[in-house]
Image (cartoon, rainbow, N blue to C red):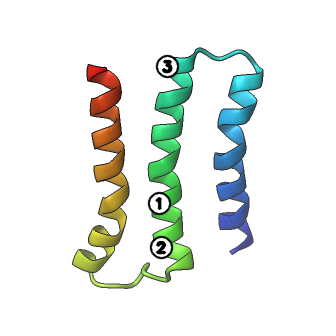
Amino acid sequence: MLAVYVALMICTMTPVIAMQAGADLSVLVWLVFALVIVKAVLLVDHFMEMKHAPWGWRMAAQGWAIVVVAVLAGVRWLG
């Protein structure tokens, strides 16, 4: 559980560190999009304890992040 917590903290800190290092805005946006999916998988599997749930329930719980990121990426790409 500690490893998951540390991984979530690293996912949270990475965009801030990249921003302070002078990363381009578009790189930061795509980095955040990728990390949202990683964090969603970790949260659903470990904190919601769905690691051993039936496949459909697990994918439904994790699917919201993919849908949200896809919509926001589409808006970002088209805008």
Seen from the viewer's position, the closer of residues 36 and 79 is 79
CA neighbours of label 2 inside 10 A, class few (<14), some (14 to 19), many (20+): some
Reply above or below: 33 against 6.
above
Residue at x 67% of width, y 48% of height: 12
Q: Earlier in the sequence, mark 3 or mark 1?
A: 3
Query: Can you identify the residue that label 3 sits on?
Result: 26
Mark 2: which amino acid? Asp
- Residue at numbered disc 1: 40
Q: Pointer 2: what residue? A: 45
- Judge from the rendering whether residue 36 lies leftward or rightward of residue 77; answer left or right: right
Q: Determine the CA span between mark 3 and mark 2.
A: 29 Å
Q: Check whether the beta carbons of the residues at disc 3 and disc 1 lie within 8 A of each other.
A: no
- The crowd level at tag 3 (other Cα within 10 Å; few <14, some 14-19, many 20+) is few
Residue at 37% over, 55% down: 65
Image quadrant in which the N terminus is located: bottom right
Element at badge 2?
A: helix
Vertical relation: 40 (above or below) 51 = above
| Three-letter amino acid code at the position of disc 3 | Ser
